[in-house]
């Protein structure tokens, strides 16, 4: 039996658990209503949130946005994997891959493609390699800053909003 279990966010208690654990794991995360809003979007059918457990302990989560804010994905009805997080002590145990497998399977029932955005600085290096190894390729629209294409010759800030989007054809 696998030590990794993936389940969908379905209850307010699970949303509270996510809020609590993220505030413990990440100094930048401030407790609030984010995961309660995610739960409501799950119920409404605009988001799918997966929670990953390792040996019965919450190890991270990931979402798919069925209506992406990225214009190319939105206009082409391409669901977007969003906000993948695996807590530090659970990394390198194939948890992210298992969440991706599940999201890709779910999305394959309604879409031919799935997409994801990834940051461009070194902190995203592991994610960049993982997405490439899973068959994600650049969507051909260049880099974006806050979901707006960066124009040649313009300056942007290198932060979490400087992203290149990738796409994968699902079989």
Image (cartoon, rainbow, N blue to C red):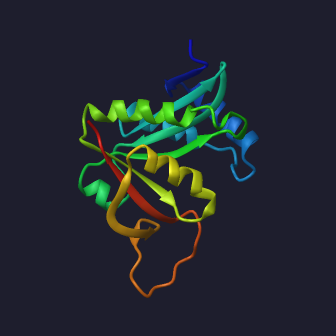
* Identity of the residue furthest to the front in this view: 133
Residue 105 percent coordinates (x, y):
35, 30
Residue 167 percent coordinates (x, y):
34, 52
**Residue, x 65% and y 28% (percent of image)?**
58
**Residue, x 58% and y 72% (percent of image)?**
158
Q: Can I make out residue 161 in this image?
A: yes
Tally the numbered discs.
0
Residue 47 percent coordinates (x, y):
41, 39
**Residue, x 70% and y 49% (percent of image)?**
30
The answer to whether residue 149 is above or below residue 8 is below
For the C terminus, the image quarter is: top left
Q: Is residue 50 left or right of residue 149?
A: right
* Identity of the residue furthest to the bottom in this view: 153
Q: Can I make out residue 39 in this image?
A: no
Q: Is residue 15 left or right of residue 70?
A: right
34 vs 92, nearest the viewer: 92
For the N terminus, the image quarter is: top right
Residue 60 percent coordinates (x, y):
61, 35
The answer to whether residue 14 is above or below residue 38 is above
Q: Is residue 125 left or right of residue 87?
A: left
93 vs 50, nearest the viewer: 93
**Residue, x 48% and y 64% (percent of image)?**
163
74 vs 12, nearest the viewer: 74
């Amino acid at each position: 039996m696998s030590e990794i279990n993936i389940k969908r966010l379905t209850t307010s208690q699970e949303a509270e658990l996510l809020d609590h654990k993220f505030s413990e794991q990440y100094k930048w995360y401030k407790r609030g209503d984010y995961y309660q809003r995610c739960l409501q979007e799950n119920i409404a059918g605009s988001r799918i949130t997966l929670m990953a457990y390792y040996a019965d302990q919450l190890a991270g989560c990931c979402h798919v946005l069925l209506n992406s804010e990225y214009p190319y994905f939105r206009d082409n009805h391409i669901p977007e994997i969003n906000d993948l997080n695996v807590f530090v002590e659970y990394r390198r145990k194939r948890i992210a891959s298992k969440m991706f497998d599940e999201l890709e399977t779910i999305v394959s029932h309604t879409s031919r493609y799935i997409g994801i955005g990834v940051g461009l600085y070194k902190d995203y290096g592991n994610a960049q390699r993982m997405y490439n190894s899973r068959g994600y390729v650049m969507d051909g629209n260049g880099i974006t800053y806050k979901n707006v294409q960066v124009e040649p010759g313009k300056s942007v800030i290198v932060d979490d909003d400087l992203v290149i989007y990738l796409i994968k054809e699902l079989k």
